[in-house]
Image (tube, rainbow, N blue to C red):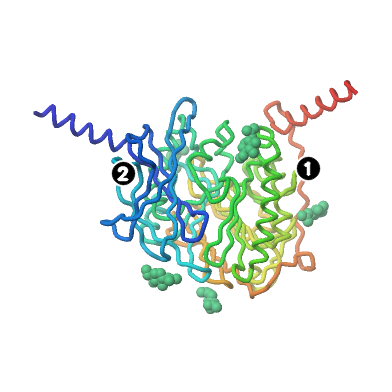
C-alpha cells in the first residue's frame, strides 16, 4: 500500500518534469500579437500540434493558436523548442494562457496586452549581464514585476552565464528561475559575447523568438518609441563566423532607421539596444578599448561601424551592456560631447547612451578608471534601469540600485515635435581625447593577431602564385 503511493507520487513528479518549462513571452510581428515560447526535455507525449490556449478568464481558455516545434541537439542533448503566436489580442486586457500539446498542458500563466496606438505610458526594464549564479538583481526584478512596476524587459546580452554551460543545463535553470517574470511581460533579448556557444549562437537562436527573421537584429514600435536591437557580436566574432552578417545587418539597419525617421510624427523616439558599448570608462584591462569593441563603433576593413548610422538618423537613446556597472553618458557623437544647457538631454544635439550591465553575475563589482568627459554618472551598485515612455515629448530614464532600494540616477529626455539632431553645426561640443592606437602585443591566442597573420599568409601565397 505504502509502496504504491510512493510510485504514484513519483509518476506525477516525472510527468511534471517532462512537461512544458521555461515559458516566456516576446512581442509578435504585428500590433496586438504575442509569441509564447517553451521547452520540453522529453519528446511530446502526443502527436497533437504545439498549442497555446488562452482567454480573458482563467476558467475559460477558449481561444487556441497552433505553433511549431524544433528539435535542438547540442552535444547530444536534445531539447524540444516550441513557439506559438497569439494574434488579434484585445488591447490593454488581462489574458490567461496555457501551453503544451493536447493532454500535456502547462499550468495557467497570465499577462496584460498592450494598449493600441502610440499614446500610452510604457515602462521598460533594461539590463544586461545577468547570471544564474550571483544574479543579484533577480529577486528584486521578480518582485517589481509582481507589483506591476514595468511592462516589458530588454535584456541586452550576456544571459545566464552561459545558456550553453553544462550542455545547456545552466540555461534551463536560468530560464526556469526567471520564468515568473518573463511569462508575465515580454522578454526581448539581444546577443552578447557570452551567447557564443561555439556553434554560431545556437542556444540563443533556439531559445528565443524575436520579431522578424532573426533574433540578432530586429525592431518594433511600442507607445511613441521605435525600438531597435542589433548584434555587436557579428563584429566581435567575425573571425569565426564571417563578415557577411555585419553587412546584412548594416543594410537592414539603414532601411529600418530610414523608415523610422520618416515616421517620426507618429513615433518621435528611436531607442536602440546592443551589447558592447562605444564608450566606457571602466578600468578592467583594456575592455573599453579592445580591438573587438572598437570596431563596433568605427568599423574595420570594409565593415562599417555602427556609430555613424546612429548619428545619421538621430538615435535618441542607446542602451549598452558588457561592462558590469552603470554609466550614463552626455549626448555624444563621434567623440564630441554636448553637455551645454540646463538639460543637455532636452532637444539634444547627439545620441545619449547608458551602460546598464550591473544586474549581477559571477564577477565582483566593476571598477572605474579615470573619469571620461563624456561620462555623466557612474555607479557599481547592482541594479537595473527603467525607461518610462511618458508621451511623444518626454522620456524618463532611471537607474535603480537594488542595494539601496531606490533610484540613484534619473534623466529626462525632452524633445519638441520636429526637433532634429544637428551635431555638426554645434560649436560648443567638447572633443574627447584621441583613442590611443591599438598597440596590444600579439599573442597566439589573440584573435586579431591570428587573423592578421592569416591575411599576410594569404597575401604571400597570392604573390607566389602570380
Ligand atoms: C488600461 O487599463 C487600465 C485599467 O486596467 C486603465 O487604468 C488604463 O487607463 C488603460 N490604458 C489605456 C491606454 O487605455
Ligand atoms: C552564423 O550565423 C549567421 C546568421 O546569424 C550566418 O549569416 C552565418 O553565415 C553563420 N556563419 C557560419 C560560419 O555558420
Ligand atoms: C569621426 O571623426 C573622424 C575624424 O576624427 C572621421 O575620420 C570619421 O569619418 C568620423 N566619423 C563619422 C561617423 O562621422
Ligand atoms: C557570489 O557572491 C558572493 C558574495 O559576494 C561571493 O562570496 C561568491 O564568491 C560569489 N560566487 C560566485 C560563484 O561568484
Ligand atoms: C508628457 O509627459 C510629461 C511628463 O509626464 C508631462 O509633463 C507633459 O505635460 C506631457 N505632455 C503632454 C502633451 O501630455
Tell me what residue is drawn at x 41 percent, y 64 percent: 90
Q: Where is mark 2, residue-wise?
A: 105
Q: Residues within 10 Å of mark 1 (few under 14, many from 20)?
A: few
Is any atom of residue 137 visible in this view? Answer: no
Q: Is residue 331 left or right of residue 117?
A: right
Instruction: Say which element carries label 1.
Output: loop
Q: Is residue 433 left or right of residue 89?
A: right
Residue 260: x and y, percent? Answer: 64, 62
The C terminus: image quadrant: top right
Tell me what residue is drawn at x 68 percent, y 45 percent: 248
Q: Contact (CB < 8 A) between labels 2 and 1? A: no
Is label 2's Cβ within 8 Å of ligand 1?
no
Q: Is residue 276 left or right of residue 454?
A: left
Q: Measure the C-alpha gap from mark 2 to mark 1.
A: 50 Å
Q: Residues within 10 Å of mark 2 (few under 14, many from 20)?
A: some
Tell me what residue is drawn at x 32 percent, y 34 percent: 45
The N terminus: image quadrant: top left
Q: Nearer the viewer, residue 269 or 58?
A: 58
Q: Nearer the viewer, residue 131 or 78?
A: 78
> Along the polypeptide, which appears first: circle 2 or circle 1?
2
Q: Where is mark 1, residue-wise?
A: 302
Is label 1's Cβ within 8 Å of ligand 3?
no
Residue 430: x and y, percent? Answer: 75, 62
Snapshot quadrant of residue 5: top left
Ligand 1 occupies quarter = bottom left
Snapshot quadrant of residue 314: bottom right
Residue 443: x and y, percent? Answer: 71, 28
Amino acid at each position: 500500500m505504502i509502496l504504491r503511493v510512493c510510485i504514484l507520487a513519483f509518476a506525477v513528479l516525472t510527468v511534471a518534469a517532462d512537461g512544458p518549462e521555461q515559458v516566456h513571452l516576446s512581442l509578435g510581428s504585428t500590433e496586438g500579437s504575442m509569441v509564447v515560447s517553451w521547452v520540453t526535455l522529453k519528446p511530446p507525449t502526443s502527436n497533437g500540434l504545439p498549442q497555446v490556449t488562452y482567454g480573458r478568464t482563467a476558467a475559460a481558455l477558449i481561444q487556441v493558436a497552433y505553433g511549431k516545434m524544433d528539435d535542438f541537439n547540442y552535444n547530444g542533448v536534445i531539447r524540444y523548442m516550441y513557439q506559438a503566436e497569439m494574434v488579434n489580442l484585445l488591447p490593454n486586457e488581462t489574458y490567461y494562457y496555457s501551453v503544451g500539446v493536447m493532454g500535456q498542458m502547462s499550468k495557467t500563466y497570465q499577462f496584460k496586452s498592450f494598449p493600441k496606438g502610440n499614446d500610452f505610458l510604457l515602462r521598460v526594464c533594461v539590463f544586461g549581464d545577468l547570471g544564474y549564479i550571483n544574479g543579484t538583481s533577480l529577486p528584486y526584478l521578480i518582485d517589481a514585476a509582481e507589483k506591476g512596476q514595468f511592462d516589458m524587459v530588454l535584456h541586452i546580452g550576456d544571459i545566464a552565464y552561459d545558456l550553453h554551460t553544462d550542455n545547456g543545463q545552466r540555461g534551463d535553470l536560468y530560464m526556469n528561475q526567471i520564468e515568473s517574470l518573463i511569462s508575465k511581460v515580454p522578454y526581448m533579448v539581444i546577443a552578447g559575447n557570452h551567447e557564443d556557444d561555439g556553434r554560431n549562437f545556437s542556444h540563443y537562436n533556439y531559445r528565443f523568438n524575436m520579431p522578424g527573421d532573426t533574433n540578432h537584429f530586429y525592431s518594433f514600435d511600442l507607445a511613441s518609441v521605435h525600438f531597435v536591437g542589433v548584434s555587436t557580436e557579428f563584429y566581435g566574432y567575425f573571425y569565426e563566423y564571417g563578415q557577411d552578417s555585419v553587412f546584412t545587418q548594416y543594410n537592414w539597419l539603414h532601411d529600418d532607421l530610414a523608415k523610422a525617421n520618416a515616421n517620426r510624427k507618429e513615433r518621435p523616439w528611436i531607442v536602440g539596444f546592443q551589447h558592447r558599448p562605444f564608450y566606457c570608462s571602466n578600468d578592467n584591462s583594456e575592455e573599453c578599448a579592445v580591438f573587438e569593441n572598437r570596431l563596433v563603433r568605427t568599423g574595420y576593413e570594409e565593415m562599417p561601424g555602427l556609430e555613424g548610422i546612429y548619428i545619421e538618423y538621430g538615435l535618441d537613446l542607446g542602451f549598452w551592456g558588457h561592462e558590469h556597472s552603470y554609466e550614463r553618458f552626455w549626448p555624444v557623437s563621434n567623440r564630441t560631447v554636448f553637455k551645454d544647457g540646463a538639460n543637455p538631454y532636452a532637444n539634444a544635439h547627439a545620441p545619449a547612451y547608458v551602460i546598464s550591465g550591473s544586474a549581477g553575475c559571477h564577477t565582483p563589482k566593476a571598477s572605474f578608471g579615470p573619469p571620461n568627459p563624456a561620462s555623466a554618472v557612474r555607479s557599481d551598485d547592482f541594479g537595473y534601469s527603467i525607461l518610462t515612455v511618458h508621451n511623444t515629448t518626454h522620456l524618463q530614464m532611471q537607474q535603480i540600485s537594488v542595494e539601496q532600494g531606490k533610484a540613484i540616477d534619473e534623466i529626462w529626455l525632452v524633445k519638441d515635435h520636429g526637433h532634429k539632431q544637428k551635431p555638426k553645426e554645434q560649436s560648443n561640443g567638447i572633443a574627447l581625447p584621441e583613442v590611443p592606437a591599438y598597440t596590444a602585443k600579439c599573442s597566439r591566442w589573440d584573435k586579431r593577431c591570428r587573423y592578421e597573420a592569416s591575411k599576410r599568409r594569404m597575401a604571400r601565397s597570392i604573390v607566389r602564385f602570380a
